[in-house]
Image (spheres, rainbow, N blue to C red):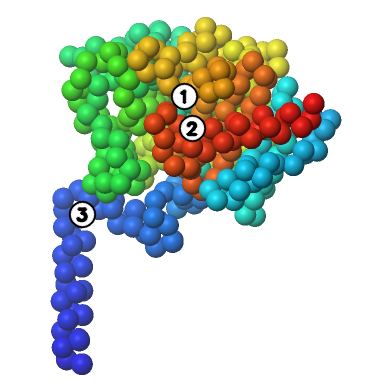
Amino acid sequence: MKRLKKFLKWVFIVLIVFVIGLYVTGYGYILKGVWVVYLHGHTTAFIDDFKFFESEKIPASTNPQPWPIYKNYNSVEMTQRLSETNKELGTVAFLIIKNDSIWFEKYFEGYRKNSQTNSFSMAKSITSALLGKAIDEGFIKSLDQPVADFYPQFAETDLTVGDLSSMASGLDWNESYVNPFGMTARAYYDADLANNILKLKVIDTPGVHYKYLSGNIELLAMVIQKATQKQLADYLYDSFWSPMGAENPALWQVDDGEHKLVKAYCCIGSNARDFARFGKLYKDYGKWNGRQLLDSAFVAKSITPRFPKSPEYGYGFWLSDFLGKKIFVMRGILGQYVIVVPEDDLIIVRLGQRRGTKTDLPFSSDFYVYIDEVYKMLEQNQ
């Protein structure tokens, strides 16, 4: 018994020293990560984790605009392959919008049409849309405006706001999702996001090639806020959430610091129907029910590859030519998708717990399954 007590005492001392060491060396945020993730039964960020973070509230629109319901709504069952994939990967919402009307929708695991789940990196597309709005309104001159106009520490670089949106910044951000000491984990769990972002250095020539870095979009968000003098959540509400008639309120996670900076590279809590509105907005080149909310030229540029060697990305949107179609996509790390096929007036939204296996293509395996099987469902309706 004495040996056990002595052993436990030393374990306790080691843990105390370890915890103190984390805080002294600036890695105290790791403890929050452990609490949020592992002590709640997960191994990585999850779709309901916004409950453990502070958030800015985005109200529902005062003029809600419900999606029309297709005349043959839910008349076709999911294919067996789609059903199996949704079950295997923990899909919580699957929505098909055809000709701007809801053709099919299904919810799983106790989630409903108004359930909020984490957008993850789909928020990058929304932040890029806010860049377009800031340009429209004259707060930002163009995609070519230097970041140094807003943050002078980048004066010795040629970094532009367009480079941030198109993932061509050359910043020294390490996009690692497994390293607890890396920038991605620090940005997600630490208290002073802005300070960490402004420590980044440009180590590669901006505007030359594509490299996916979440830090790009966070710096872009800081530029937009500084240019507009508005909190990003408020600017989102004024620019899109309200005029597009979002039916439900949303949340946007913020850091724990003094200024409550939104995590613009991720973390908008909303539902499939309201996320789909951004697919329709871009499908219709910035026009919403007759009102031009976003410049059509900016939209066209956003859903076109900037670099021929990286045809999978434009400005804030993923791109695909699957099935020989021109497809643009909002995408999150756990298989969150707003998939838009303009030529067929089709929007597919999938929200869920996991994504499929990696492939040699720009998307994981589930992405291709969702599109394939939706077209099989649509064929049954002809």
Report x, y in % for residue 75. 80, 38
Report x, y in % for residue 84. 61, 48
> What is the crowding at mark 1: few (fewer than 14 residues within 10 Å), some, or many (at least 20)?
many
Q: Which residue is mark 3?
A: 23
Give me the residue at 37% from left, 18% from top.
310
Where residue 64 sits, quadrant-wise, is top right
Give me the residue at 17% from left, 91% from top.
2
Tag on residue 318?
A: 1
Give me the residue at 16% from left, 50% from top.
25
Tag on residue 28?
A: none
Question: In the picture shown, does residue 373 fall above or below 167?
Answer: below
Q: Which residue is mark 2?
A: 331
**Tag 2: amino acid:** Arg
Q: In the rendered structure, are the residues bearing label 2 and label 1 in contact, judged by CB atoms less than 8 Å apart?
A: yes
Upstream in sequence: badge 2 or badge 1:
1
**Tag 3: amino acid:** Tyr
> What is the crowding at mark 3: few (fewer than 14 residues within 10 Å), some, or many (at least 20)?
few
Of residues 187 and 136, the one drawn nearer to the viewer in this rendering: 187
**Tag 1: amino acid:** Trp
Report if residue 179 is visible in the image.
Answer: yes
Report if residue 148 is visible in the image.
Answer: no
Left or right placement of residue 113 versus residue 38 in this view: right
Q: For numbered disc 3, what is the local secondary structure?
A: helix
Of residues 279 and 89, the one drawn nearer to the viewer in this rendering: 89
